[in-house]
Image (cartoon, rainbow, N blue to C red):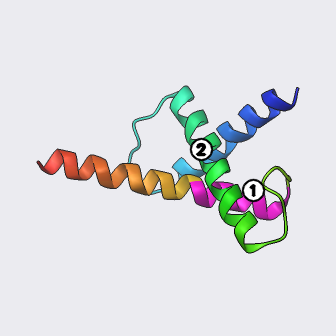
Amino acid sequence: MGLVLFILFGFFVGLIARAVMPGNQQMGFLMTTGLGIAGSFTGGILVSLVTNHRVTDLHTAGFIGSVVGALLLLLIVGSFKNRRADA
């Protein structure tokens, strides 16, 4: 049950990150979920470096960190796509 909730949490985080990031991201359901899960790991690691929380704890800073991590990943992927389109 924990894995299913983590996947749903990842999808929710991915949707929020895509809604906040300006521009059009061409992603489907699976890519949005993958973005949220990867952002959750990235944000969780960043938050655990700053606070005393473990990476696996679910707390408000973890949720915010997950969205910030997903936004960072969207920014990185978008910059690579722009470079490739210019070449």
Q: Secondary structure at mark 2?
A: helix
Please, is residue 32 above or below residue 82 in the view? Answer: above
Q: Which residue is mark 2?
A: 38
Labels 1 and 2: the sequence-earlier one: 2
Q: CA distance from mark 1 to mark 2?
A: 13 Å
Please, is residue 54 above or below residue 39 in the view? Answer: below
Q: Which residue is mark 1?
A: 63
Task: Please tell me whether mark 1 or mark 2 is closer to you in this view.
Answer: 2
**Residue 59, percent from left and from top:** 85, 58
Tell me the residue at 71%/68% (across/down): 49
Q: Amino acid at mark 1?
A: Phe
Circle 2: is it few (<14), some (14-19), or many (20+) Cα within 10 Å?
Answer: some
Q: Is residue 24 left or right of residue 57?
A: left
Question: What's the magenta region?
Answer: 59-69
Please, is residue 2 above or below residue 63 in the view? Answer: above
Quadrant into which the N terminus falls: top right
**Residue 80, percent from left and from top:** 30, 50
Q: How many marks?
A: 2
Tell me the residue at 35%/51% (across/down): 78
User: Can you see residue 20?
Assistant: no
